[in-house]
Image (cartoon, helix red, strand yellow):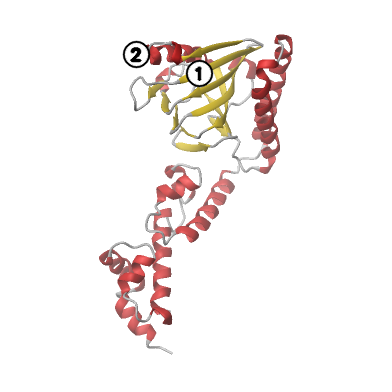
Amino acid sequence: MRAHSFRTSDVPRLERRRHWEASLSPYFGRLHRDTGGGDSLDAHLDVYDMGGIAAIRMEISRSRVTRLARDAIDKGGDYFKLSMQLRGCADVTVDGETVRLDAGDWIALDQRRPYTWESPADSKLFGLQIPRARLTGMKLPAMLSSQSTEPETGGMKSVLSGYLRTLEAQIGRIAEQAAILLADTSLGLVAAMLEDERRVPARAEDSLAGLRLRAEKFVRARACDPEFTVDELAKALHCSRRYLYKAFSGEMLSPEKMIWQLRLERSCQALLAPKNAARSIGSIAFDHGFNSDAHFIRAFKARYGMPPARYRQHFSAQP
């Protein structure tokens, strides 16, 4: 099967960005690109026609692209995007939720929804641009990734992962007639995955509860690190800060309060430990994530009703 290929190295440097955007627009629509490095774009694109489905292999230098809501009705909106990260990593944000893609992860996007795709280093990707008309009658999610932990869809997502890896490795050796049959196979796999996703009962609460449990476990492990923040927690859990706070909506503690409360509890325990009898209150506070004596004393008094020095004196004197 022949590929339509494009390399920015074949184009004068000042014209690379314009030519690259023109090569992408038939499949991805209008993308607003911020390289942080002017027009120093290094990219390579191979497009294979699989019976109306475009199989696309792409290598690109560090970049950040955004698809805006106002561009939803352009030609890119006619496609449902399925893309696998082969090398490097990327952060993809849709509706305020961010998914981190590492090598081997894939993501499905409805290109009628705005999104941001940020690759902090050189990347290689492979994916399918599926015409929406071929998925008529199916509910297309705004974003769906291989990282879902739902057991009901995990098997089908693993099958799709294996298929994409194999297809990418063999795409240049496939005859054109066979490619038409593979288009039907691709549609069948995507349809099966979407159908599995549809059949799973709406369990947003279960998903949020699972996220809360993972967040609490992570906080217990990292709370005393003074560099540990809510942003670091969200990044470790592969979700956005906004979605993390949503998981704690209605709970007594927000993620930030949970971190500080655990620091206080551990500081309090350390204050009364006999092995710390000769240590200063400030050094104990610093060991448990505080970087200000004044902040520690205020927070401690608000929680325990007395300053840490008095608390230590009072309870250490008791048998």
**Left or right: 139 in relation to 97:** right
Q: Earlier in the sequence, mark 2 or mark 1?
A: 2
Quadrant of image for the C terminus: bottom left
The amino acid sitting under disc 2 is Leu
Front-lying residue, 144 or 123: 123
Give the image location of residue 170, x and y in percent.
68, 21
Residue 156 showing in the rendered view: yes
Q: Residue at x 49, y 61 (%)?
A: 220
Q: Residues within 10 Å of mark 1 (few under 14, many from 20)?
A: some
The amino acid sitting under disc 1 is His
Give the image location of residue 316, x and y in percent.
38, 84
Q: Mark number for residue 85?
A: none
Quadrant of image for the N terminus: top right
What residue does disc 2 label? 14
Q: Quadrant of residue 107?
A: top right
Say what secondary structure mark 1 lies in: strand
Q: Residue at x 57, y 19 (%)?
A: 56
Q: Mark number for residue 44?
A: 1
Give the image location of residue 31, x and y in percent.
42, 20
